[in-house]
Image (cartoon, grey):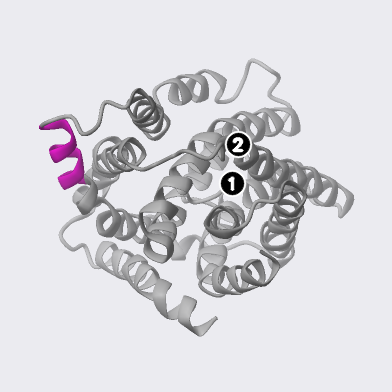
Amino acid sequence: MLNILWSILPIFVLIVLGNLLRRGGIPSVTFWNLNDKLVYWVLFPSLLFYKTSTTDLAGGIIGPLAAIILTGLVAAVAVSLILGLALGFNRPQATSILQGSARHNTFIALAIAERLFGTEGLAVAALCTSVLVPPTNVLVISLMNILLRQGSGGGLWAPVARDLARNPLILSVGLGIGVNYLGAGEIPVVHEVTGMLGRAALPIVLLAVGANIRLHEMKASASPIAVATLVKFLVFPAAAWAMCWHLGVTGVPAYVITVFAVMPMPPSSFTIAREMGGDAPLAASMVTVQTLLSLITVPVSLVIAQNLF
């Protein structure tokens, strides 16, 4: 466990550094706002395209991987809804518990997968991203609409549908897999440019993750945070591990799935909660708490996965 913790510690150091830089106005708040767009639209799509188009994806892993990761998602969503409502939380709080249980920080997951498992890990993580992002967003937004009584046509339906259709992470993975299966090899200039941009992605995106953590917005009570965090770090991985065992998935794919299963919720959860009428301060608090806890939960979960698989 100490070896894993030591290996991923630089990732969390960069996250902390990003937060400190933004709070200190270095280089400026405007820079960090624009940096988010650079990471989302250019750097990470370049990295995902390069890796998925140049890595051997043979072995029929996509089907089992989808079954495993989506089983974990459905289990986390179901348990979070039951607990959120049965324990007497109001509906805005229940939607934040839902987000905290089901949504994940893709960027940290990709960084850890690459750091621990190299090119193979990053390729599997890219597939996890393409499988998990669309259903997570559709399912969570649908249930938030229902809980907040906004109806099937209200809330963020149009923006979510539009964002999924043009999501650069999904599009870059799909394009990379297409190029890979066509056997086109490395395309001159295209792969050189995306490779260069991809190498810049991980450190910059981790700084951006830290910059988006809002410590001053931690004003929520502990009980809903505890419920969401327990579901995220216990139910999601337990369901995923059960499916890994059932389908016989072991090694790096099982370890990368574990990483995704215990990822903290992303900072964008705060924005979604605020725009849909949920409990935004609670969502902000969950992001911070889960991100800090993941420094421990990730290595612990990986040790368990290594023993199981």
**Tag 2 near tag 1, CB within 8 Å:** yes
**Residue 77 at what x, y percent from top left?**
73, 43
Residue hosting label 2: 136
In the depicted view, which residue is nearer to us: 50 or 152?
50
Q: Which residues are magenta?
A: 189-197
Question: What's the magenta bit mostly, secondary-structure-wise?
Answer: helix
| Residue at the extreme right of the image, as rendered | 86
Few, some or many C-alpha atoms within 10 Å of disc 2 (few <14, some 14-19, many ≥20)?
some
The tag on residue 60 is none
**Residue 65 at what x, y percent from top left?**
61, 42
Direction from residue 232 to residue 59 in the image, left or right: left
Direction from residue 98 to residue 260 in the image, left or right: left
Q: Residue visible at 68% across and 38% down?
A: 67
**Residue 50 at what x, y percent from top left?**
28, 40
In the depicted view, which residue is nearer to us: 246 or 197?
246
Considering only order in the chain, which callout, 1 or 2, is on the residue closer to the N terminus? 1
Assign a secondary structure to mark 1.
loop
Q: Which quarter of the picture shows residue 64?
A: top right
Residue hosting label 1: 103
Hey, what amino acid is under mark 2?
A: Thr
Q: Quadrant of the N terminus?
A: bottom right
